[in-house]
Amino acid sequence: MHILIVDDEKMQREMLQGFLEKQGYSVLTAADGEEALQLFRANPVQLVLIDHRMEDMNGDEVLARMRQESPLVRAIMITAYGSVATAVKVMQIGADDFLEKPVDLLELLEKIRKIEQDVIASEEAEEVAGSLARQPLPLHIIGSSREMQDVLSLLHRAAPVEWPILIRGETGTGKEMIAKCIHLLGQRKREPFIEVNCAAIPENLFESELFGHEKGAFTGASARRRGRFELAHKGTIFLDEIGELPLQMQAKLLRVLQEKSISRVGSENQVFVDVRVIAATNRDLKQMVADGSFREDLYFRLNVLELFIPPLRERRGDIVELADYFLGKYSAGVSFDSEAQAIFVKYDFPGNVRELEHIIQRLVTFVRGKVIRVNDLPVEVREQTDSGGLLSDRLARVEKEMLLSSLEQHDWVQTRAADALGISERVLRYKMKKYGLEGRSG
């Protein structure tokens, strides 16, 4: 990571530079704002450590000018005049965090490493999005929330290797889409991608469906038929809803994964198959192992790499982006008014992205005109977000108290409060506006 230190105190600059270089970072230093801007323009700086008070220009002015040229630059403000007001101001102009002098080097290192992970995740997510957009049949993964950036970053790392992957997530979160992305970004992208929905195959047909059969193997087998594993040879097989696989078939699947060969129903011959296996489930396989309904050895064989896709209610920052995408896909020109959009974002979407897409399809079909208003929203959306009712009132009060408590505990620094609550800063700002907490600082 390339770091620029901006401080008019030579001793402070040299101390920070020496410490960070020992940690393996590439470090530049500047004694004032003008020198900092020159170095920033000439070098690929990813993070700036800026002294808030300097003689030629304050740190907030330096940062503002840097962000005009490169909005993605990350920054930590260092100040000898720590206060809530200063913290709020530096966060508002785009600093990721702030530190008071004398600088705690271990705390600084912790903050830098967190920002470094964010930068890496964002860069890898952008690379994934670009690669998918360049495919002959492009795929679009919608979602710029931190949660989805992390998913795409892990996808970027998992795709090139050949190990089995288990994708976990609730129904409708997009597990099939993620599996296709892994295939397209992997070494087998020009080979078949074969999907198997384990929940949709009758139990007596599982073996034939997966491994094929010979002519006359059973009543109705009028010709030899290749199974899904043979069809996926050299490519990828995607076993969706793997938790629905019967125990008897689990043993046979395990043998195939171990021996890399299958035997068609009605045949004694072994057929070599070279496939990459991606499995997905909306069930708790660990609990199923404990209950005896899923083989432990098969679980460990499938779960070499694991990807978890968070439900939509845990990444509400993606809801507006997804809604806009599906509105553009199904009916250009239709949009939400502000009140309807605010209610739409509050809905929990138990069916996740799939449910959101279906609701948008319903809305663009039945809306009169080009603007979706509150009365156009489905009953389930309006009812869940209705402010009436004792339970919803109590939940709203509890949520507001949690927000207020976290903000006060972290001196109203929104980044820290959001991290403590386990939500994105964007969601925190939305909820602060909802409960009238904007502009308060104690």
Image: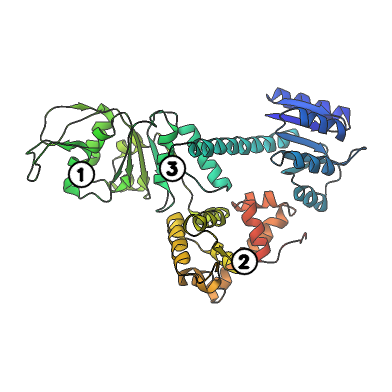
Check disc 2 and report the residue beneath it: 338
**Vertical relation: 88 (above or below) 277:** below
Question: Viewed as shown, does residue 202 lie left or right of 289?
Answer: left
Q: Residues within 10 Å of mark 1 (few under 14, many from 20)?
A: some
**SS for callout 2:** helix
Rounded to the nearest angstrom, the CA distance separating label 3 from label 2 is: 32 Å
**Vertical relation: 282 (above or below) 336:** above
Check disc 3 and report the residue beneath it: 178
Q: Residues within 10 Å of mark 2 (few under 14, many from 20)?
A: few
Q: Amino acid at mark 2?
A: Ser
Res. 100 visible in picture = no
Q: Closer to the observer: label 2 or label 1?
A: 2
Residue 206: give its label: 1
Q: Pick the quarter of the image with the C terminus.
A: bottom right
Task: State the image coordinates of residue 15 (x, y, percent, origin top left).
Answer: 81, 27
Task: State the image coordinates of residue 100 (x, y, percent, origin top left).
Answer: 81, 41
Question: Viewed as shown, does residue 239 lie left or right of 371?
Answer: left
